Image: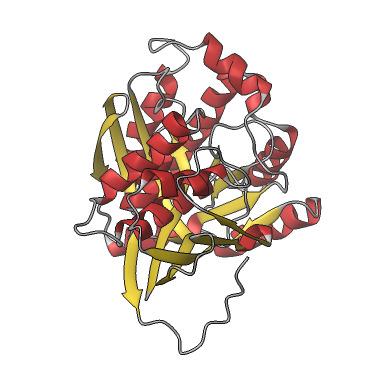
């Protein structure tokens, strides 16, 4: 049997940093988009060898594990998912994992992979977890099992899909309010959005630890971030593109206010080009810092948008425009009969 699952990445996470344990409460806005993380499980009988054969396609790696792992080797986020989920003892499986979004793009790619994998593994036992429950498990794997710094919004975006306003009452408890837009508004939003990868993988850095160490739940620097989430929601519901762009810019400047190094030179160069070409908004995705990506909101002129993207590509061979589309669906999972002959080489 084959089990397939997909989960989207997210962009334009206005209000990020306030979905964390140190903020304690927050408001976050984000947009789920294609490309999605994809997971496929090929279930097979036990053969006496390791039970799990992992193919991490983006890394060109194949290796085997035999859960419970306890200690994690190559890809802890993947391996910990097998420990967290109840997998029947009488099966083995080949696991293929892929996402077109570059690793370290600051668009919640790791959360999308985790949500898709947990959702697929959930299909191996009776009953089904709600997508929001899948998101919680994915977030707890990062924080409790792996001891990493992690908010809640990335997993919720991947599990729920769509455009969401997230009200985190008290970490990690949150209510997700989906935005339902008229089709023309959604189409216009999709046509105006662009995602630019700066070409360097984003990773936690010393500056992030400095920011975290200096923050408290009532830190005045967090208030503007919380406000941009509601402003983004209200602007989209009113189809007020100028206001939506202002909310994106305000969020980026609030990130800069946490620490100037959160907006790197590559981000700033992309922002400068976007401003010169009449873009309405820009948001450094994720927590900011080294590497990652920028979400841009163009104006009504599609020709100007194309010119903007060409100019960014000409500025540096590292800058990459990643095609995105709105993704109304969150976690999707389904089964299919196995192929007549598998071409999957085991590790």
Q: Is residue 235 left or right of residue 42?
A: left
Is residue 258 placed above or below 174 in the rendered structure? above
* Residue 252 found in image quarter: top right
Viewer-nearest residue: 204 or 165 = 204
Q: Is residue 238 left or right of residue 38?
A: left
Q: Is residue 343 left or right of residue 8?
A: right
Residue at 55% x, 46% y is: 295
Count of marks placed on residues: 0
* Residue 220 found in image quarter: top left
Residue 180 drawn at (x, y percent): 25, 53
Residue 330 drawn at (x, y percent): 34, 56
Is residue 226 among what the camera can see? yes
Is residue 241 among what the camera can see? no
Q: Quadrant of the C terminus?
A: bottom right
Residue at 62% x, 30% y is: 204
Find the residue positioned furthest to the bottom. Answer: 340
Viewer-nearest residue: 223 or 35 = 35
Viewer-nearest residue: 296 or 7 = 7
Find the residue positioned furthest to the front. Answer: 48
Residue 216 drawn at (x, y percent): 44, 10
Residue at 32% x, 44% y is: 164
Residue 14 drawn at (x, y percent): 44, 35
Query: What's the coloring here?
Result: secondary structure
Q: Quadrant of the N terminus?
A: bottom left
């Amino acid at each position: 049997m084959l089990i397939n699952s997909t989960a989207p990445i997210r962009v334009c996470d206005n209000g990020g940093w306030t979905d964390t344990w140190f903020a304690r409460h927050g408001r976050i806005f984000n947009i789920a988009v294609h490309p999605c993380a994809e997971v496929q499980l090929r279930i097979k009988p036990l053969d006496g060898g390791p039970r799990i054969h992992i193919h991490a396609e983006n890394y060109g790696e194949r290796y085997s594990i035999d859960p419970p792992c306890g200690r994690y080797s190559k890809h802890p986020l993947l391996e910990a998912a097998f420990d967290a989920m109840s997998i029947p003892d009488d099966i083995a499986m080949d696991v293929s994992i892929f996402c077109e979004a570059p690793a370290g793009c600051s668009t919640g790619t790791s959360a999308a992979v985790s949500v898709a994998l947990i959702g697929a593994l959930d299909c191996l036992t009776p009953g089904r977890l709600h997508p929001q429950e899948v998101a919680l498990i994915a977030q707890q794997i990062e924080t409790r099992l792996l001891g990493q710094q992690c908010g809640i919004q990335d997993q919720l975006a991947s599990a729920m899909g769509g455009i969401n306003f997230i009200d985190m009452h008290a970490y990690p408890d949150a209510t997700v309010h989906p935005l339902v837009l008229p089709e023309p508004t959604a189409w216009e939003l999709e046509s105006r959005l662009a995602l630019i990868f700066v070409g360097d993988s984003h990773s936690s850095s010393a500056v992030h630890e400095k920011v975290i160490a200096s923050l408290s739940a009532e830190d005045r620097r967090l208030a503007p971030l919380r406000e941009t989430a509601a402003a983004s929601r209200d602007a989209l519901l009113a189809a007020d593109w100028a206001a939506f762009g202002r909310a994106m810019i305000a969020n980026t400047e609030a990130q800069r206010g946490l620490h100037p190094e959160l907006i790197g030179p590559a981000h700033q160069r992309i922002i400068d080009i976007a401003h010169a070409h009449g873009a309405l908004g820009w948001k450094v995705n994720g927590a900011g810092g080294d590497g990652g990506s920028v979400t841009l909101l163009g104006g009504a002129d599609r020709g100007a948008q194309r010119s903007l993207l060409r100019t960014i590509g000409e500025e540096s061979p590292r800058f990459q425009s990643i095609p995105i589309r709105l993704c109304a669906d969150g976690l999707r999972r389904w089964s299919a009969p196995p192929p007549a002959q598998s071409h999957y080489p085991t590790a």
